[in-house]
Image (cartoon, rainbow, N blue to C red):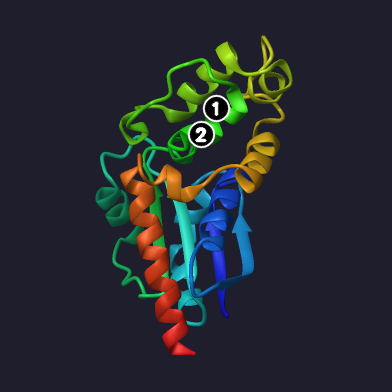
Amino acid sequence: MAGLAIATEDELSEAVALRLVADVEPALQVTQTLRRNGFGYLRAKMASWCELAHHQPVFLLTDLDQVVCPVELLGQWRGALTLPSDLLMRVAVREVEAWLLADHEAMRGLFGERGRLPIEPDQLPDPKARLLQLATKYAPRDVRADLVKTTGAMASQGIGYNARLTQWVQSCWRPDRAAERSPSLLRARIRLQELAQRSARAR
């Protein structure tokens, strides 16, 4: 197996990245997981990711947020750097929550059968807000308590948001199903598969 470093924004993105890696063949062994809260850490360390990718493959996952498109975001982050072939940088459009919403079967298992799930989640201006809206209206009480913030709370989500969704990603979410509705996820899966194949040939 080829060692792989994963760099992500937060706990939930890390869980998604690990789930994506688990789907590829030949297998990639994750040897490092690197994350802090927010994209600032990822962007500030672009030179370090490039250097690390000369020694082992790196899978960097971030959200597009309000940037116009992934190409523009990549250009902003890359600057004058030349990205190594083993640095795989993928962008969730517009947030990793869009990738979660794209698996309708798993979402219905979490929230129940009521509620209209987005057909094209990559087109949502704020996927996290849509997920929280659905949770507020349709989720069972225990799920809603984890995901949705209490009245007056400063955070945009409940204190159990990352823990609940991380466990759900690990046990229920299927990237292959979600990729049918999310072009940005489909591209990420293809590029990660290519990385696995290159790593296998290099051994």
> Decide: marks 2, 1 in contact (CB < 8 A)?
yes
Mark 2 Cα-neighbour bin, 10 Å: few <14, some 14–19, many ≥20? some
- x and y percent of residue 29 in the render? 60, 72
- x and y percent of residue 106 in the render? 55, 35
All told, the count of numbered labels is: 2
Marking on residue 105: 2
Quadrant of the rendering where the N terminus is positioned: bottom right
Asked whether, in this view, residue 186 is left or right of residue 100, the answer is left
Marking on residue 108: 1
Disc 1, SS: helix
- x and y percent of residue 95 in the render? 43, 38
Question: Which is more toward the observer, 180 or 164?
Answer: 180
Q: Amino acid at mark 1?
A: Arg
Asked whether, in this view, residue 39 is left or right of residue 120, the answer is right
Q: Amino acid at mark 2?
A: Glu
* Residue that appears at 55% across and 49% down: 16
Mark 1 Cα-neighbour bin, 10 Å: few <14, some 14–19, many ≥20? some
Disc 2, SS: helix
- x and y percent of residue 104 in the render? 47, 32
Asked whether, in this view, residue 192 is left or right of residue 80, the answer is right
As drawn, the residue found furthest toward the right would be 142
Vertical placement of residue 104 versus 53, above or below: above
* Residue that appears at 41% across and 74% down: 86
Vertical placement of residue 72 versus 123, above or below: below
* Residue that appears at 30% across and 48% down: 70
* Residue that appears at 48% across and 49% down: 175
Asked whether, in this view, residue 155 is left or right of residue 42, the answer is right
